[in-house]
Image (cartoon, rainbow, N blue to C red):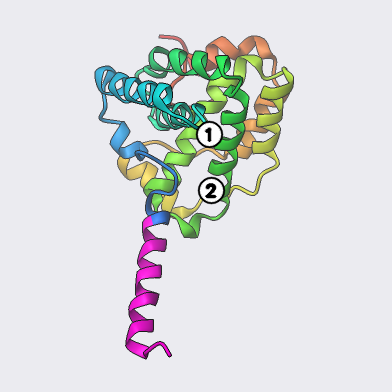
Amino acid sequence: MISTNHFSRFTFFILLLGFGLFSKAGLLYTSNTLASKDLAAMNKIVDEKMIEAKKARGDRFVPLKEALQTILCRPDTDGLISRVLPPVKNELQKMKAWERSISSLTQESIGALSNPKNFQPKVQNSYYVFLQNLMAELHPQVQSGFEKSIFEKIKNSKILLSEELKRERTMHMMQETPDLKTLAAQILTENPTAAPELAAEPAGISPGPSH
């Protein structure tokens, strides 16, 4: 028979484990941490994941999927994504795992943002930034089958932008929090020739004036 004291310690351990899982979820880094990483630091993360993928005995694409998520979770206020993403994308495409990785990470992000109470604001923000950057990345091909399906998935999702998320973005990023479902719907209906202008606007999805 399990004692009450033992049961209490066991319950506490489970709760603590659950908090640890929800504090960062499946993320290697949060957007707050990634925002301070420069090109050299991001290249180091990518290089380490590329080496890990080459040494992997099982699903070699998994470390590259982690690298992909890390890249797209970084706020792209300096356009750095376009400099570090291509090697990871190329390797995933060679493995025929690009679309599978995008689909999996999109679902993970939607799942977290659809249940915000289970995740810390900084984690919610990381998944928000991921989807925001992903839409900017896929926008030029939005009329293609796979890319269009990703936008449709976001548009039809149950994402909830919590007040905690909005405060997090206001305090730490000094940015507003546009509704991702509305943005996805707008992009699906707009002229795809606007894509280059959109992709040049790293801080958000809506295109702005050229500088």
Q: Which of 148 and 185 is in front in this view?
A: 148
Task: Using a 10 Å C-alpha cutoff, classify the residue at mark 1 as few (fewer than 14 neighbours), some (14 to 19) or many (20 or more).
Answer: many
Quadrant of image for the N terminus: bottom left
- Residue 173 in view of the camera: no
- The residue segment tinted magenta is 1-20
Tell whether position 2 is magenta: yes
Task: Report helix, strand or loop for mark 1.
Answer: helix
Q: Residue 113 carries which label?
A: 2
Label 1, label 2: how far apart the Cα atoms are:
10 Å
In the visual, does 171 lie left or right of 196?
left
Contact between labelled residues 2 and 1, with CB atoms less than 8 Å apart: yes
Q: Nearer the viewer, residue 200 or 134?
A: 134
Q: What residue type is labelled 2?
A: Leu
Along the polypeptide, which appears first: circle 1 or circle 2?
Answer: 2
Tell whether position 202 is magenta: no
Q: Residue 131 carries which label?
A: 1
